[in-house]
Amino acid sequence: MIEQLNNLKETAISQIKEAKNADDLEAVRIKYLGRKGEMAKVMGLISSLPDSEKPAAGRLINQVKPLLEEEISKKQKSFTLAEKQNPQSKKDLTMPGHRFESGHTHPITQTISDICAIFRHMGFAVVEGPEIETEHNNFEALNIPLNHPSRDAFDTFYIKNEFLLRSHTSPVQVRYMTKHKSPLAIIVPGKVFRPDAVDASHSFMFHQVEGLMVDERVSLAHLRGVLFEFCRQLFGEDIKLRFRPHFFPFTEPSAEVDVSCIICKGAGCSVCSQKGWLEILGAGMVNPKVFKAVGIDSEKYTGFAFGMGVERIAMLKYGINDIRLFFENDIRFLEQF
Ligand code: DAH
């Protein structure tokens, strides 16, 4: 066995020395050190040796293996060095490296960060809430009781019992006000879910940004001022705003807010269906019933809230006519942003 090992060592070393290139060397390495190689075979034989010979054989194996590994690595280095020094080498070290395609943020993510940046400059804090909500936060605390007709439009995917995928970002109002009380000014970006059939303007999942400001003497004028400044910064200086009376259970009074069409500047075109106006968000003064649900004194404090659809804003801003484009991951679309 000892003799066999010594022979094996000699032949292996001479074959390593003779290797002419990296491929040869790899073949030798596999032949001797591979999982089913010569060394492994010899090791398998140890158990059949008489006990008296086992320690010496074991010791020798432990010497030969690292020795061969070292010879192989030396030889490898000599190949690399030769390659570097060889003027005929096929490798051109002056060639530029491989360029990796670096991706960029998705247009929806970009739009969310543009929106948040504008509000942050006005002093709003950006906060987030969970996508799985309680029925209480999504509905009841926002003054949408079980049998209220407006629940239909918001109704959503139930998970089990009282848990559901939130159908709007408004429940984060409830979470935040319950914990922090007044005064506060927050903006809440996030995903929302509705069992809507998918078409060019609907998706079962989309994004919203919710806004909420509560303090003493907050008025509708503050809401208008904040939204006007936001629209001016997002869409341009010459934008006009219009508040149309509307109904939301969690605000009173409520309004839908339109901007003058950013394509035709109000003259009427196909994007605004000849109306000159584009609806961009819902808003209003926080309903005292919501304050009651979160434990804020509605005699002392007032607040405004608003909610906008991010896809809709991005579609208007970039002139995109189909919401599905955002979610199909077609690189030809995404590359344009
Ligand atoms: N939650 C509403 C929706 O999903 C949007 C909304 C309207 C939010 C008015 C508000 C608001 O905070 O005041 O359609």
Image (cartoon, helix red, strand yellow):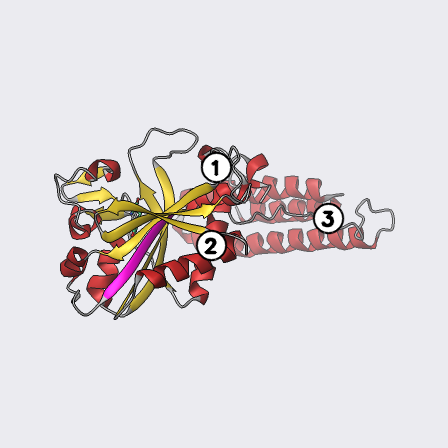
Q: Is residue 303 magenta?
A: yes
The residue at which mark 2 appears reads as 231
Q: Is residue 106 magenta?
A: no
How many neighbours does mark 3 have within 10 angstroms: few (below 14), some (14-19), or many (20 or more)?
Answer: some
In this view of the protein, can residue 170 be seen by the observer? no
Relative vertical location of residue 148 with respect to residue 118 in this rendering, above or below: above
State the SS at label 3.
Answer: helix
| Tag 2–tag 1 contact (CB < 8 Å) | no
Extent of the magenta region: 302-308
Residue 20 image point, x, y percent: 76, 43
- Which residue appears at 43% of the width and 64% of the height? 120
Q: Amino acid at mark 3?
A: Lys
Q: Is mark 2 within 8 Å of ligand 1?
A: no
Residue 128 image point, x, y percent: 33, 57
Which label's residue is closer to the chain start, 2 or 3? 3
Which label's residue is closer to the chain start, 3 or 1? 3
Mark 2 or mark 3: which is in front? 2
